[in-house]
Image (cartoon, helix red, strand yellow):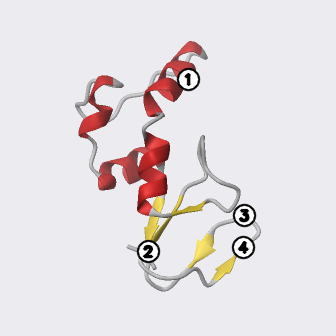
């Protein structure tokens, strides 16, 4: 079963999410964008106008933007850093 390893803002304790769970977390990205901006962080991605263009992101772009990793198979093990390993990373 495919899953996404995401350990950023809004992740669950296991840091493993279905595609729908991950995309649901990303619906809160505009709020997090403004929070980070208020802390002095300037975030940009490609030629997008953030956060207005978050709704144009594809799954692949969300993965790239957040640093999340998509896996095709079941997790094999969990290392000390919480990262799951599998033979089918894409």
What residue sits 56% from the left and 13% below the top? 38
Q: Indicate which disc residue 85 carries.
A: none
Pointer 2 residue? 2
Q: Indicate which disc residue 79 carries.
A: 4
Are dots 4 and 1 in contact, CB under 8 Å? Answer: no
Pointer 1 residue? 36
Q: CA distance from mark 1 to mark 3?
A: 24 Å
Give the SS element for disc 2.
Answer: loop
Pointer 3 residue? 81
Q: Position of residue 51 (x, y in %)?
A: 36, 25
Q: Return the residue nearer the eye: 64 or 22.
A: 22
Choose mark 2 or mark 3, whichever is in front. 2
Give the SS element for disc 1.
Answer: helix
Are dots 3 and 4 in contact, CB under 8 Å? Answer: yes
Q: CA distance from mark 2 to mark 3?
A: 21 Å
Tell me if residue 56 comes above or below residue 83 in the rendering: above
The C terminus sits in image quarter:
bottom left
Tell me if residue 89 comes above or below residue 7 in the rendering: below
In the rendered image, which quarter is residue 20 located in? bottom left
Q: Position of residue 59 (x, y in %)?
A: 32, 54
């Amino acid at each position: 079963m495919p899953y996404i390893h995401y350990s950023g803002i809004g992740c669950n304790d296991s840091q493993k999410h279905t595609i729908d769970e991950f995309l649901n977390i990303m619906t809160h990205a505009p709020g997090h964008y403004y929070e980070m901006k208020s802390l002095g962080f300037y975030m940009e991605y490609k030629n997008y106008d953030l956060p207005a263009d978050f709704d144009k992101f594809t799954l692949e772009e969300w993965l790239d933007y957040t640093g999340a990793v998509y896996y095709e198979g079941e997790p094999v093990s969990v290392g000390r850093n919480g990262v799951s390993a599998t033979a089918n990373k894409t």
